[in-house]
Image (tube, coloured by chain):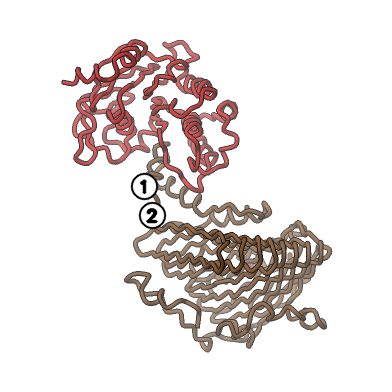
Chain colours: A red, B brown
Amino acid sequence: MFEIRGLSVNVGDRPILRDVNLSIGKGETVALFGPNGSGKTSLLHTIMGIPGYQVLSGTILFKGEDITGKTLDQRARMGIGLAFQRPPAVRGVKLADLVRILKAVRPDDPGASLQAHIARLDLENIQSRDLNLGFSGGETKRSELLQLLAQGPDLVLLDEPDSGVDLISITAVGQTINFLLEKEKAPAHRERSGLIITQSGCILDHVTTDSACVMVRGRILCTGSARDLLEDISNKGYEGCVQCVP
Amino acid sequence: MCPVRKEVRDGNVGERPAPEMEVDFAKYRTRARPHPRLKKLGDLPDDLKESTLDLGLDTERGCRAGSYVQVDHSVLFSRAWGKGLEVTSITDAAGKRGRLRGYRWRNLSPEADRFTEQAKRHPHHGFFIRVLPGVKVELPLQACLYMTERGLAQNVHNIIVAEEGSEIHIITGCGSDPGVGEGLHIGVTEYYIRKGATVSYTMIHSWGREMVVRPRSAALLEEEGVFISNFVSLKPVRSLQMDPVVTCVGKNARVRLNSILLAPEGTDLDVGGRIFLRAGECSAEIISRAITTGGRIVARGHVTGAVPQVKAHLECRGLILSEEGTVLAVPELEGLTRDVDLSHEAAVGRIAEEQITYLMSRGLTEETATSAIVRGFLNVKMEGLPSRLAAQISRAVEAADISGM
């Protein structure tokens, strides 16, 4: 479904990612941990194809195709979707406008189910507001999820979906992510995969993952079960991980 | 002389000099072929119906509270359907004894500039709209000033009177046939907004490429009067310059001037607004959205807070979508006493790359993403406007040609 082989990336002259290898099978969800500035967001942006991330070596494979040279809109149309951590405000473009545009290009109509999600995510009132303009942290996360629902991606990239979200709406956020990743289906029947960055691990109380990995200084150092890794990190901090940096 | 300030001419617009704004009146014809008066609006010739549709002229019955249609120098139609509402040509109103007394040239001096003077010297009608005290007209009222003759000058003088406690929404469409070539339109408009009255005035301009346009307006607001002016110009026009003056003389009056401007190559728009707050608790907003795809735009705004307890905000955003286009934002605030609250924000530049990237990450092509942002940019929320008129503006924005990026 999705694989990264030997990926090294610079932003300007600065090395951001070094020899990253990662594989996510169909229907799998992977959590990504790491300290601030370790390159987690850069990895998601590179997968999405955001300009400015210069791939020095390595390949990104999606649905059996090498997408390393594809533009970000091509990747999005192939089925990659990213919920940004801090999306820019777009004055004049309403959340509802964008959702309408996204729905229109999809072959299947997510219209009816979308209404239920809008209600659950408590987005009725911000739909008519300019995209991300003056949105609170929680509103931003929920609005990003709504856009992904309208887009319907097969690879769901979530950049800290739990930061800034209050205790009450975290449940709704979790439910929405579970819907996006088809968690209601048996693992063998899931078509969609996910890669979730989380610092606190809060979202993992609501969304199950198949595995997790830790990124430090632009490298993926270890892989294991999310629970074990999170326990290790909360006991020893990332200091323990740093020792693993070659 | 048109009131373009010297510092602008002298090169604030960078290396590109401001286009020549001298207008030679002798170049334009002062006589026009007459057009017959219409019995009903539906009798408007099909070609005119078609070309005035974009200007908001609705010839179906029951959609408007009143209509005034002028083509070149002929009044084709003027009628009010609503009660407590008068719609006539200014010429007819002047004929009825005393009708215009206290209104004509009371709010605006004919000596204000040479265009105003020219409009007084060679008048070609214009409309008189008056809504009686306490009458709230729900349906919009429409006025259309159109030009079909090559090389013509059309000088109109309009007067709008909203008596105490009344409310009216007016849509005016001003434009010319695409084939008209050169022409000059001078539109003098005086607004009298009495105590507690509300006037919304939406202007959609759609001129030919070689037209010179000089609207000259002045509004007077009494206590608790509300004036909302929306100006929309999205088509190429050689030169359009206006700087309407609004004076609030009564307490708690509210003014909002919105303009939506698009300047393709060969277009020169200089659109401003001067608001004088002369009574306590008055408030004003000037909001402009300016896009150039190759033309030159000057977006001005000037607010004077002359007494304590007044409030105003100017907001000007300009997008430059081509190498050749220029935008000059000139927000001016003048406080004449301590207790005033005047502010402005202005931003001029390109579309932020990260906004385009963001929308493209959802699968939109660069073109679709840019278009969504540009149309969103122009779609200013126009508070206090009936939904029909808001929809009219949105349609114009949707249809605007924003290519040339």
Q: Is residue B216 above or below residue A75?
A: below
Q: Where residue A7 sits: x, y (%)?
A: 22, 28
Q: Is residue A54 above or below residue A65?
A: below
Q: Is residue A20 above or below residue B371?
A: above
**Pointer 1 and pointer 2 on the same chain:** yes
Dot 2 amino acid type? Arg
Is residue B56 among what the camera can see? no
The number of callouts visible is 2
Q: Nearer the viewer, residue B223 or B242?
A: B223
Within the image, what quadrant is residue A16 found in?
top left
Number of other residues with Cα within 10 Å of mark 1, as a class: few under 14, some 14 to 19, many 20 or more: few
Would residue B393 be found to the left or right of residue A229 on screen? right
Q: Where residue B395 sits: x, y (%)?
A: 58, 54
Number of other residues with Cα within 10 Å of mark 2, as a class: few under 14, some 14 to 19, many 20 or more: few
SS under mark 2: loop
Would residue A113 be found to the left or right of residue B143 on screen? left
Quarter of the image with the C terminus of chain B is: bottom left
Q: Which residue is mark 1?
A: B353
- Identify which residue is drawn at 37% across, 11% down: A227
Dot 1 amino acid type? Glu
The chain letter under disc 2 is: B
Within the image, what quadrant is residue B51 found in?
bottom right
Q: Which residue is mark 2?
A: B350
Outermost residue on the left side: it is A246
CA distance for labels 1 and 2: 8 Å
Outermost residue on the front side: it is B338
> Cβ–Cβ below 8 Å for labels 1 and 2?
yes
Q: Where residue A81 sits: x, y (%)?
A: 40, 30
Within the image, what quadrant is residue B66 found in?
bottom right
- Identify which residue is drawn at 70% across, 74% down: B159
